[in-house]
């Protein structure tokens, strides 16, 4: 008996039958369009917040505000890089700050030897790729706690190496790192536009906004929604099942590690330009733990959540300065309370604003499905079928 199936038809012994799919029992509501679509609405909100960030120097241009805001956007960039490793791929990394150090030290060493800071970007990317391969190549076959211990050791190795090498300045670190500039002009010279003078701090702040709030957030979000992002999420849910479905889990995890390292290294360049000095004490384990906390607190794998988590971790100690020595105690209590009442994070990856829900209020999610009930008794129909 010759059979064949094409789209919508089935052929048996030369006869073609049209296949008609069963119609739904009830008409389901059409998906939301326009700004009611959650992804579009969040993109609009993100764009408005980015414009507000650009307008901050026109609202408050004090050195303290601009400095804190610059550091916050660098921290967002760093947290988004870690979100690739922890939030998307599910790799517990306790040494991510090491890539931050690799980027800061590479750019600092080159920039203090008469290379313009902007030209250090390719060298930082190569250095971070090398560091990602060195640490990720032999260790990514480990899982969970074992991987966390190895990455913790990697972070300490980088810090101790910087503490003992002459080229990195030893315990004193590197000072006098120049800011961004080109063809003899630097950010410190400022910029005059439409009769308004913008200082070097404001220009560096806008650079951090573009790099951290614009490029990094957009790039990491697009990566998470693409094919590679789906492979990361499959590995995070069940690595064995992902490998059985044909995903090369080792290379996919290594890609997450390398891409995360690149964003960490680029954030290191901004930090070196912002602080003009770096030392090994800037890359202690506590900072890695706080950065991991920002991702977990905000919501692993969630772009809005990680941004909120990074802002909370970075700005909360600054906002609690009036409480002097009690501020870290209050900060710790605040984190504990958040994790008790929001164990999935402040903004989980599946969160949708209430007024953007797809279904109308009062409609059951079981709509369109018939009730399934167990048979009253088992009936042997083998004789009837025979």
Image: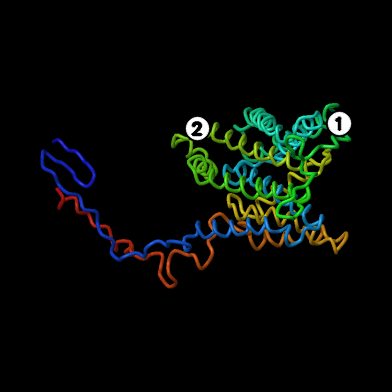
- Quadrant including the N terminus: top left
User: Mark 2 and mark 1 in contact (Cβ < 8 Å)?
Assistant: no
Q: Is residue 107 above or below residue 325?
A: above
Q: Position of residue 122 (x, y in %)?
A: 66, 31
Q: Is residue 5 above or below residue 133?
A: below
Farthest left residue in view = 14
Q: CA distance from mark 1 to mark 2?
A: 41 Å
Q: Quadrant of residue 261?
A: top right
* Left or right side of 339 for 24: left
Q: Nearer the viewer, mark 1 or mark 2?
A: 1
* Left or right side of 325 for 76: left
Q: Quadrant of residue 145?
A: top right
Q: Is residue 339 above or below residue 91?
A: below
**Residue underneath mark 2:** 248
Which of 149/134 is in front?
Answer: 134
Q: Residues within 10 Å of mark 2 (few under 14, many from 20)?
A: some
Q: Residues within 10 Å of mark 1 (few under 14, many from 20)?
A: some
- Which one is earlier in the sequence, the residue at label 1 or at label 2? 1
Q: Position of residue 24 (x, y in %)?
A: 28, 61
* Left or right side of 142 for 335: right
Q: Quadrant of residue 127?
A: top right
The local secondary structure at tag 2 comes to: loop
* Left or right side of 370 for 39: right
The residue shown at (74%, 39%) is: 180
Q: Which mark is residue 169?
A: 1
């Amino acid at each position: 008996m010759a059979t064949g199936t094409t789209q919508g038809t089935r052929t048996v012994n030369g006869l073609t039958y049209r296949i008609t799919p069963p119609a739904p029992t009830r008409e389901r509501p059409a998906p939301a369009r326009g700004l009611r679509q959650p992804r579009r609405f969040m993109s609009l909100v993100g764009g408005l917040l980015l414009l507000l960030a650009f307008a901050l120097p026109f609202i408050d241009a004090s050195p303290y505000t601009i400095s804190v805001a610059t550091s916050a956007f660098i921290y967002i960039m760093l947290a988004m890089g870690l979100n690739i490793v922890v939030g998307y791929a599910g790799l517990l990394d306790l040494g991510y700050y090491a890539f931050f150090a690799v980027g800061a030290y590479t750019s600092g060493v080159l920039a203090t030897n008469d290379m313009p800071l902007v030209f250090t970007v390719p060298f930082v990317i190569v250095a971070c790729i090398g560091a990602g391969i060195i640490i990720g190549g032999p260790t990514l076959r480990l899982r969970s706690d074992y991987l966390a211990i190895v990455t913790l050791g990697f972070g300490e190795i980088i810090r101790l190496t910087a503490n003992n090498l002459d080229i990195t300045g030893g315990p004193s670190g590197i000072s006098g790192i120049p800011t961004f500039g080109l063809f003899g002009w630097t950010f410190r010279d400022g910029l005059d536009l439409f009769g308004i003078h913008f200082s070097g701090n404001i220009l560096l702040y806008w650079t951090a906004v573009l790099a951290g709030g614009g490029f990094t957030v957009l790039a990491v979000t697009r990566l998470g929604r693409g094919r590679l992002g789906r492979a990361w999420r499959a590995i995070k849910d069940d690595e064995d099942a992902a490998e059985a479905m044909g995903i090369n889990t080792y290379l996919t995890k290594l890609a997450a590690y390398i891409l995360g390292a690149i964003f960490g290294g680029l954030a290191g360049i901004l930090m070196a330009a912002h602080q003009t000095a770096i030392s090994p004490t800037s890359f202690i384990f506590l900072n890695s733990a706080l950065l991991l906390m920002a991702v977990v607190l905000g919501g692993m794998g969630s772009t809005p959540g990680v941004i909120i988590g990074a802002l909370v971790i970075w700005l909360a100690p600054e906002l609690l300065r009036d409480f002097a020595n009690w501020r870290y105690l209050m900060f710790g209590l605040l984190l504990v309370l958040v994790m008790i009442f929001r164990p999935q994070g402040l903004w989980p990856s599946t969160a949708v604003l209430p007024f953007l829900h797809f279904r109308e209020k009062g409609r059951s999610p079981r709509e369109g499905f018939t009730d399934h009930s167990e048979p009253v008794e088992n009936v042997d129909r083998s004789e009837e079928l025979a």
